[in-house]
């Protein structure tokens, strides 16, 4: 067996049995050398960790080049890797240089900072979405290894494909994240920050289905009630403004007092997502929200209608409050439905409504079994599948149900193409319902005529 002697006893024919039997050094690292492959060495640490490396003098300078850990890498694989490295050395290349370059290579997180400063923030209206996507879906271990901590050359197509596949439950977001990473690597290559292969090319995106969810007429009273009872008044008013104007979330979040003309009842958005400006008429309900915000403003110096404590100066992510509101609206709907079925003696509606308002989640859990006894389903009253962006679609849908023409709806929502407004034609069920009623009435009339 090889000993600690640093001459012949440290050089032997590597076999699994011999390597497994090597003693652990009392301190530091012990090195052993393969008798078959020139320069192939094995390091053994005091903790038992073993790894293959190439030890060669290159241009008179000794170099240790990492090959891989044992036993993850077999002896034969290590010998083949050694042959490749030796061939590079024979051609007067130094494989250690690539390792040194890799250690100094920037990480994906460092690239994002450069990308954001040089491209996203100055050129993209949706630059804050880039920040959110990177933080929630790249710089995280939720979908596998944290890609943000990897060197650029370590972000391979295989790793990105696996990361993308794990986001299958949120296909649209997964595709946006992939598009962001693709843009980042394209810019890194363009700016000479990366000279490797583009890892995003060839990755198939998930098919996307256009979302058609909006607040239905029977849901609207419950949503408004839940909003009125939201303790965070800034978020409450932000959501109401989004509902009453149909403006995009980011535009409402960054709404400034300087852009609001109260006398004209107008709001001027200098730059929307599609790159154009827009002047929105403000309804009486929207004006009331603005008056309430103005009266409640504690920081008169804030330029924003919906100020926030962060560096941006405005509220950024109202998702937590939105979730509270949707749970509250769901609980209220369930309580109201039970009240219509249950007897007053066995169900105290007022007490249940108070519970639904203050403790909605517990209320849903407590009354779910009672609802089932009356043939009611929580799913029929559930608002929790509503997104904030659905408020924009809600205004368009209610305009369509009121008989507003598609061109006017497109103007109200600042759609760039008529195709973007077509969804509201199919969401408006009023005319369809009337046509079906006429048709079925005609069917029943035939029965009456035979009698």
Image (spheres, grey):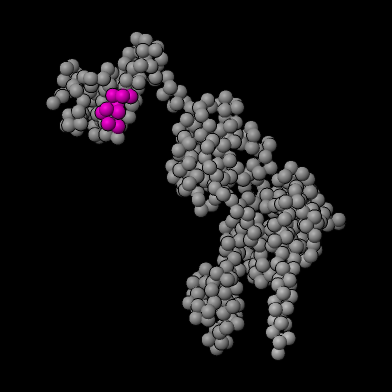
Q: Which x, y percent locates residue 36? A: 23, 20
55 w.r.t. 20: above or below: above
Q: Which residues are magenta?
A: 73-81
Quadrant assignment for the N terminus:
top left
Residue pictured at 73% horizontal, 78% vertical: 442
Q: Nearer the viewer, residue 212 or 367?
A: 212
Placement of 10 over or under 179, stated as above or below? above
Residue 366: image location, x then y, percent: 49, 75
Direction front: furthest residue: 450
**Prevalent SS, magenta region:** helix
In the rendered image, the vertical position of residue 64 relative to residue 393, given as above or below: above
* x and y percentages locating residue 235 in the rendered image: 65, 58
Q: Quadrant of the C terminus?
A: bottom right
Please check the rendered image and state whether residue 314 is part of the magenta-colored stretch, yes or no.
no
Picture quadrant where residue 129 is located = top right
Q: Is residue 113 left or right of residue 399?
A: left
The reply to whether residue 383 is visible in this rendering is yes
Instruction: Answer left or right for 37 relative to 403.
Output: left
In x, y percent, where is residue 79? 28, 24
Q: Looking at the rendering, which quadrant does residue 189 occupy?
A: top right
């Amino acid at each position: 067996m090889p000993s600690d002697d640093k001459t012949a006893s440290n050089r032997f024919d590597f076999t699994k049995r011999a390597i497994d039997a090597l003693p652990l050094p009392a301190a530091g690292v012990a090195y052993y050398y393969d008798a078959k492959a020139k320069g192939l060495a094995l390091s053994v640490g005091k903790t038992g960790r073993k790894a293959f490396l190439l030890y060669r003098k290159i241009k008179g300078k000794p170099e240790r080049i990492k090959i891989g850990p044992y036993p993850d890498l077999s002896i034969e694989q290590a010998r083949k890797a050694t042959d490749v490295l030796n061939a590079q050395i024979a051609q007067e290349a130094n494989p250690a240089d690539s390792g040194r370059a890799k250690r100094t290579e920037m990480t994906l997180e460092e690239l994002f900072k450069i990308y954001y400063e040089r491209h996203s923030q100055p050129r993209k209206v949706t630059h804050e979405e880039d920040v959110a996507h990177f933080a929630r879906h790249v710089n995280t271990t939720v979908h596998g290894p944290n890609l943000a901590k990897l060197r650029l050359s370590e972000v391979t197509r295989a790793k990105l494909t696996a990361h993308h596949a794990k986001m299958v439950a949120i296909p649209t977001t997964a595709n946006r994240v992939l598009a962001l990473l693709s843009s980042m690597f394209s810019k890194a290559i363009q700016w000479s920050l990366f000279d490797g292969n583009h890892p995003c090319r060839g990755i198939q995106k998930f098919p996307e289905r256009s979302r058609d969810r909006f607040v239905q007429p029977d849901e609207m009273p419950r949503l408004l009630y839940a909003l009125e009872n939201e303790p965070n008044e800034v978020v409450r008013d932000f959501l109401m403004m989004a509902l009453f104007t149909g403006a995009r979330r980011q535009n409402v979040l960054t709404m400034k007092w300087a852009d609001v003309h109260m006398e004209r009842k107008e709001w001027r958005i200098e730059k929307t997502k599609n790159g154009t400006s827009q002047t929105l008429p403000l309804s009486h309900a929207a004006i009331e929200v603005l008056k309430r915000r103005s009266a409640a403003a504690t920081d008169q110096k804030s330029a924003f209608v919906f100020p926030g404590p962060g560096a941006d100066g405005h509220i950024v992510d109202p998702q937590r409050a939105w979730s509270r509101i949707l749970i509250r609206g769901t609980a209220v709907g369930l309580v109201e439905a039970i009240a219509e079925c249950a007897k007053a003696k066995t169900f105290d509606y007022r007490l249940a409504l108070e519970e639904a308002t203050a403790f909605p989640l517990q209320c849903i859990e407590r009354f779910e079994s009672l609802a089932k006894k009356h043939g009611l389903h929580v799913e029929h009253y559930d608002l929790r599948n509503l997104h904030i962006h659905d408020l924009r679609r809600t205004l368009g849908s209610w305009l369509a149900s009121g008989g507003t023409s598609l061109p006017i709806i497109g103007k109200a929502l600042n759609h760039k193409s008529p195709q973007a407004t077509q969804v509201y034609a199919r969401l408006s069920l009023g005319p369809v319902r009337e046509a079906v009623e006429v048709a079925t009435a005609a069917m029943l009339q035939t029965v009456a005529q035979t009698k």
